[in-house]
Image (tube, grey):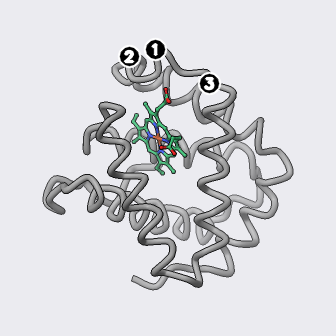
Amino acid sequence: MALNVALLESSFAQLKVNSAAVTQLFYTRLLTDYPEVQPLFAKTHMEKQGQQLFQSLVFTIDHLRQPDVLSNALKGLGTRHVQYGVLPQHYPMVGSSLLKALEASLGTAWTPEVQQAWVEAYGVITQLMLEGADCAPEQLHLPISVK
Ligand code: HEM
């Protein structure tokens, strides 16, 4: 699947301006909508975690035109997530909360095309991370829901 690189880059440039607000919105949504993931973050410093998550998104968007580099990095990230206790079924939860946070942050700039571009991008990120987690593709439930 060819990602809409130009739209991902331009929308992410707007999100970067308010990265702390975006990640705070994301984790608030995630932990409220999916309380079952709360134990995974029991010992986590959430502000630092938010910065790390956002930095990994920066890296992802910066390397959309270098698929080999991106693929290696995301597979490695997926391998580490197994050690954090993350399961395949958690990925759609994170995706849904993340996209809702992006939508709330972008406001009117969150057009159907931008939404589609991010749904597809999150699908690719998930696929690569789960490959790194040695997870069979049929365990995925894509595309994620943004409603
Ligand atoms: C787009 C997908 C995701 C991205 C980009 C992402 C990014 C990150 C990053 C950058 C870290 C810092 C540690 C490291 O680099 O290994 C991290 C840690 C973590 N992530 Fe994710 N993550 C994703 C999906 C998930 C999912 C689906 C869950 C499950 C709810 C999750 C839960 C965690 C936990 C529990 C940690 C460890 C926190 C700690 O150190 O206490 N992540 N994630």
Secondary structure at badge 1 equals loop
Q: Position of residue 59 (x, y in %)?
A: 63, 63
Q: Position of residue 99 (x, y in %)?
A: 55, 49
Residue type for callout 2:
Pro
Looking at this view, is 5 or 60 the one in front? Answer: 60
- At 42% from the left and 69% from the top, the residue drawn is 72
Question: Total of numbered circles in the picture?
Answer: 3
Mark 1: few, some, or many residues within 10 Å (few <14, many ≥20)?
Answer: few
The label shown at residue 42 is 1
Disc 1 Cβ-to-ligand 1 distance below 8 Å: no
Q: CA distance from mark 2 to mark 3?
A: 13 Å
The label shown at residue 77 is none
Left or right relative to 25: residue 127 = left
Mark 3: few, some, or many residues within 10 Å (few <14, many ≥20)?
Answer: some
Whether the residues at callouts 2 and 3 have beta carbons within 8 Å, the answer is: no
Residue 52 vertical placement versus 27 (above, below): below
Q: Position of residue 70 (x, y in %)?
A: 50, 71
**Residue that mark 3 sits on:** 46
- At 36% from the left and 42% from the top, the residue drawn is 81
